[in-house]
Image (cartoon, rainbow, N blue to C red):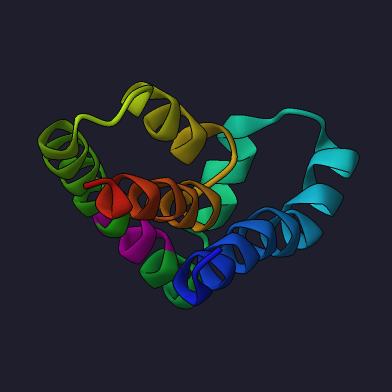
Amino acid sequence: MRFSRIILLILTIAGIILPFSGFGPFFMENGMDIRGFVQRMFEGPVSKGVAWDLMVSSITFWVLLFLEGKRLGMKYLPVYFVLNFMVGLSFAFPLFLFVREKYLEKP
């Protein structure tokens, strides 16, 4: 496995573990209160800035996902889109790049 793929795999794993270390306690305490979760995202100026940053980054990822994925003939593109919502950008994006590397290596 190429070094770049190893790094992307490590980032994919970190992208699922680290966010859930913060999200986990919220959902354990409040259940699947998505409305409360979104409300907390926009509670203060710093969290609001981070939330908007993630939203713009997610939209940018979706554009890249479908343009680059289609160009390379990648399969299962909607899965990464759903993972962006279900898990997060920090997991879906490096996973997409990890798989994309395999397609770029093809002759």
Q: Residue furthest front?
A: 107
Of residues 42 and 19, the one drawn nearer to the viewer in this rendering: 19
- Identify the residue at horizontal 81%, vertical 49% (top origin): 24
- Identify the residue at horizontal 63%, vertical 39% (top origin): 36
Asked whether 82 falls inside the magenta stretch, the response is no
Where residue 3 appears, x then y in whole percent?
Answer: 51, 76
Residue 55 can be seen in this image: no
Where residue 83 appears, x then y in whole percent?
Answer: 50, 34
Where residue 33 appears, x then y in whole percent?
Answer: 69, 30
**Which SS type dominates the magenta stretch?**
helix
Q: Is residue 16 left or right of residue 39?
A: right
Residue 79 can be seen in this image: yes
Where residue 22 appears, x then y in whole percent?
Answer: 75, 61
Q: Is residue 3 left or right of residue 14?
A: left
The magenta region covers 51-56
Q: How many labels were placed on the picture?
A: 0
- Identify the residue at horizontal 42%, vertical 34% (top origin): 80
Task: Please identify the quadrant where the N terminus is shown.
Answer: bottom right
- Identify the residue at horizontal 72%, vertical 65% (top origin): 18
Quadrant housing residue 87: top right
Of residues 88 and 73, the one drawn nearer to the viewer in this rendering: 73
Q: Is residue 71 left or right of residue 77?
A: left
Of residues 107 and 95, the one drawn nearer to the viewer in this rendering: 107
